[in-house]
Image: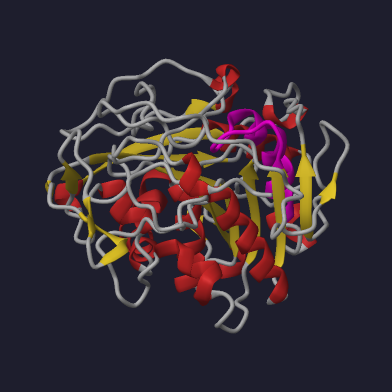
């Protein structure tokens, strides 16, 4: 049977989701570079707005969400979930080390070995794209002027509603975010290009994978845009506001404030065709990727998620979607006509399970993603769901193993004439 989330619940009431990454995925803490808020996804600034850097230097893929900076009590490592647990979707177990075929819908089990495929390392003899970067400040944003939650604080449960968290320590605060833009060598200046936009940037692993796949004619000649978040994590933070809010606001922010700057600073033209636009992310960035396409299918048709936070983490509370992203598999997808969205999803067997004070039975990342696969299948969506053995939250090794195949899957019905560059 699947483990009881109440029995596993830890004693800590710390705010943000703990990340349990195996030793092979650990990395040193990097101090913040911008503004007052710490952005846990920042790496040392190595690119400037005027400098185009060859992708040859892109060697180290980054994982998803990093641990919060605030002091917290360590929680137990999440239990290992069995993909054949009652209530989970029926999935095909693949040979160890292999990925699902890029042309197949459905549910698959991979692992426990996660080797790095050639596409995720620098390849000799292929055209190398370039990456440029610029910075966006909260003072220039009409959509997100900036908030932060006081360090070391979280919130309290509404005594009248265990699914509602009351946060009193969130307040206005400035931020800066980096936006990194990959432009393939094959891009023809002045032409209109498809693109993928990702959360928690910079995502160097995305740039490396796209560079090789374009050269192999497996994906279209696309621009890759990696947007940093506004700082913090979960309820009361800027990142939480951006990624966990169940609305079209973040997609509208990207459309109105980010993409125009990308076109200006990177000297590219981005397609308006939703079939040529993809979103991706891990953890809350993964749920955000689906939120963007769900609320604006006229903008995005392709979604890629790792350890998607399809749980109850929205703040401020919204009575129209009282259970946050849990609503996707609870009500939104089952109760709505199918939308023109193709989605690739992954979850790890040691993914997060109820890692905060809310004991609402809506904080199991594995169960949430299993439910997502079930309702997507019932509604006839094109989707591929990967359950990874020997994997934690936004597991770096799993991402290295699967990202190439995942990108091919979400672009597989794109016109072949655009891929055979």
In this view, 102 is above or below 119: below
Q: Nearer the viewer, residue 383 or 160?
A: 160
Please state the horizontal and vertical placement of residue 171, each as a whole percent of the image: 11, 49
392 magenta-colored: yes
Q: Report which quarter residue 265 is drawn in.
A: top left
Q: Position of residue 237 (x, y in %)?
A: 25, 47
Residue 213 versus residue 337 in the image, above or below: above
In front of the other: 134 or 59: 59
Q: Residue at x 30, y 75 (%)?
A: 319
Q: Is residue 315 above or below residue 398?
A: below
Q: Please state the horizontal and vertical placement of residue 420, each as a whole percent of the image.
A: 79, 52
Q: Residue furthest right?
A: 95
Residue 334 versus residue 279 in the image, above or below: below
Q: Nearer the viewer, residue 167 or 415?
A: 167
> What kind of colouring is applied to the model shown?
secondary structure
The residue located at (76%, 27%) in the rendering is 113
In the rendered structure, the answer to whether residue 165 lies left or right of residue 287 reads left
Q: Is residue 245 magenta?
A: no
- Percent across and percent down for residue 90 are 79, 58
**Residue drawn 29% across and 37% down?**
14
Residue sitting at x 55%, y 82% = 335
For the stretch drawn in magenta, the main secondary structure is: helix
In the image, taking residue 405 as reference, residue 177 lies left or right, namely left
Residue 189 seen:
no
Using the rendered image of the protein, determine whether residue 36 is visible from the camera's viewpoint.
Answer: yes
Magenta-drawn segment: 388-409
């Amino acid at each position: 049977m699947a483990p009881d989330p109440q029995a596993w619940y830890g004693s800590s009431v710390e705010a943000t989701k703990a990340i349990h990454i195996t030793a092979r995925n650990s990395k040193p803490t990097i101090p913040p570079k911008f503004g007052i808020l710490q952005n846990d996804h920042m790496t040392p600034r190595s690119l400037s707005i005027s400098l185009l850097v060859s992708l040859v230097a892109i060697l180290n893929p980054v994982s998803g969400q990093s641990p919060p900076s605030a002091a917290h009590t360590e929680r137990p490592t999440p239990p290992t979930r069995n993909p054949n647990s009652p209530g989970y979707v029926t999935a095909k177990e693949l040979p160890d080390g292999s990925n699902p075929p890029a042309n197949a819908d459905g549910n698959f089990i991979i692992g426990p070995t996660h080797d790095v495929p050639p596409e995720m390392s620098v390849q000799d003899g292929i055209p190398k794209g370039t990456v440029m970067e610029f910075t966006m400040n909260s003072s220039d944003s009409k959509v997100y002027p900036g908030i932060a939650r006081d360090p070391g604080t979280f919130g309290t449960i509404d005594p009248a509603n265990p699914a509602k968290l009351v946060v009193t320590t969130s307040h206005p605060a400035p931020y800066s975010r980096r936006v990194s833009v990959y432009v393939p060598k094959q891009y023809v200046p002045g032409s209109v290009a498809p693109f993928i936009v990702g959360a928690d940037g910079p995502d160097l692993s995305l740039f490396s994978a796209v560079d090789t796949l374009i050269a192999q004619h497996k994906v279209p000649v696309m621009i890759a845009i990696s947007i940093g978040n506004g700082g913090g994590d979960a309820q009361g933070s800027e990142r939480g506001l951006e990624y966990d809010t169940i609305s079209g606001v973040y997609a509208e922010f990207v459309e109105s404030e980010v993409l125009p700057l990308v076109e200006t600073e990177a000297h590219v033209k981005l397609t308006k065709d939703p079939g040529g636009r993809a979103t991706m992310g891990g953890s809350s960035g993964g749920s955000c990727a689906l939120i963007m396409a769900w609320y604006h299918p006229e903008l995005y048709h392709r979604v890629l998620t790792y350890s998607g936070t399809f749980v109850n983490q929205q703040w401020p509370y919204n009575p129209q979607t009282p259970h946050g992203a849990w609503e996707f598999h609870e009500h939104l997808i089952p109760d709505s006509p199918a939308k023109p969205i193709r989605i690739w999803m992954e979850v790890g067997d040691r993914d997060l399970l109820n890692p905060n004070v809310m004991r609402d039975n809506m904080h199991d990342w594995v169960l949430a993603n299993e439910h997502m696969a079930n309702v997507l299948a019932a509604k006839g969506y094109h989707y591929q769901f990967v359950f990874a053995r020997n994997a934690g939250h936004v597991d770096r090794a799993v991402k290295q193993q699967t990202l190439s195949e995942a990108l091919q899957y979400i672009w597989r019905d794109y016109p072949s004439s655009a891929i055979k560059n």
